[in-house]
Image (cartoon, helix red, strand yellow):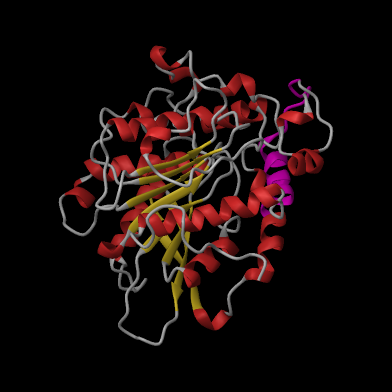
Amino acid sequence: MAAHLLDPELAAAIGPFKAEDPAYTPTVEEARVYFDKAVTTPFKTYMEPFLPPEATYVVRDEQISVDGGEITVRCLVPVVEDDIETFPVLFNIHGGGFTGGSIELDDYFLRRLCVDLRLSIVNVEYRLAPEYPFPIGVNDCLAALKWTVLNASLLRADLTKGFIVGGHSAGANLAVVMAHETTIDPFFSATPGRQLTGQLIREPRVLHPDAIPGELKAEMTASVENRYFPPLTGAISEHLLKCYAPVPTDPRCSPLLYPSHAAVSPAFVQGMQRDALRDDARVYARALRGARVTSSKCLSCLTSVAAESPRLPLYADLGMEPRVRYLGVTHGFHYNWPALKASVKLREDVVEGLKWLLGRENGLDGKALNETA
């Protein structure tokens, strides 16, 4: 695989690799060990020096009853002088291919967001496949989202200030599902103040490979073009998806297939040029735009999906500047190699995307997280 197709810093970090499927597919347990070593640990180690002072936030792990057991949510709440001040909420769903990862993955980054953006955060530890296959992870996240609503006082939250669901990779898939399920579940839809106000969608899967509509097959080529790019190759992604054991055409697996996207909240969507899931990010962004999902500030779907060719435009017609391009980078690269310039830029954009969803900035043009301080 030609190294010139990748960002030079990323190519140097990855080193040589072969354009072929691996001869051996790791077990789930092996994949989990690798994920903790190569993804969670590097990112937490990198972010540790940027942790805010302990006195500026409160960390609390809570247990939530779900069907067949309990799950943990880690709650982060800012500490401020005003005892009656309330905060918007970010509900975070970690990535890991539905089979790995934990609330530890984003923990330190979320602590920084909590303090810098004065934002209460709920980080959910949903149960993982194959021990807990589809749709258990969906149900766990929905139960935790309901817990968040019912425990707003514990979080010092005012959901009318902002109620954002977000996630990366598998977590982004679940976040998109939550954005749609909450529009049809009367617990959320029938009571004012319980509706989600935004989506932070990072490198999502929105279509199972076996559920791609015929009219999209010709343009969804990233799974072939980017099959061999580390760290998440096509073969590994397919293996983990089989462990999840979803029904491909169920919208809770393939959320692009929900009958309507018109009622969902505004979204900030990120996609990487050399990601096998690049086109998922693109078609979801386009679906929201087509459904005329709008906000009071601007068009709701602020996309940062890099253009691969003239037939895959960078949504120039959205009329938003500056445009953000993640050229030559791969799925989740910023976790494995968090110090790369492209990784720092991506996290800065996450902060600005959150500000946009909260109505604090009009696009990606405000002061971003400073990791050089």
Q: What's drawn in magenta, residue-wise?
A: 20-40
Looking at the picture, does residue 170 appear above or below residue 60? above
Name the residue: 56% across, 27% down: 242
Residue 6 % position (x, y): 71, 34
Q: 349 or 316: nearer the eye?
A: 316
Task: Look at the image and tell me in which quarter the C terminus lies.
Answer: bottom right
Looking at the picture, does residue 332 appear above or below residue 147? above
Residue 315 % position (x, y): 43, 33
Residue 301 % position (x, y): 37, 41
Name the residue: 62% across, 37% down: 327
Q: 297 or 249: nearer the eye?
A: 297
Name the residue: 31% across, 68% down: 152
Q: Main secondary structure of the magenta part?
A: helix
Is residue 34 shown in magenta? yes
Residue 95 % position (x, y): 55, 45
Looking at the picture, does residue 237 appear above or below residue 109? above
Looking at the picture, does residue 52 appear above or below residue 20? below
Q: 163 or 238: nearer the eye?
A: 163
Asked which quadrant contains residue 20, the reply is: top right
Q: Is residue 15 left or right of residue 186?
A: right
Q: How many discs mark residues in the rendered view?
A: 0
Task: Look at the image and tell me in which quarter the N terminus lies.
Answer: top right
In the displayed image of the protein, which residue is found farthest to the right? 16
Is residue 252 shown in magenta? no
Q: Is residue 102 visible?
A: no
Asked which quadrant contains residue 137, the reply is: top left
Q: Is residue 121 visible?
A: yes
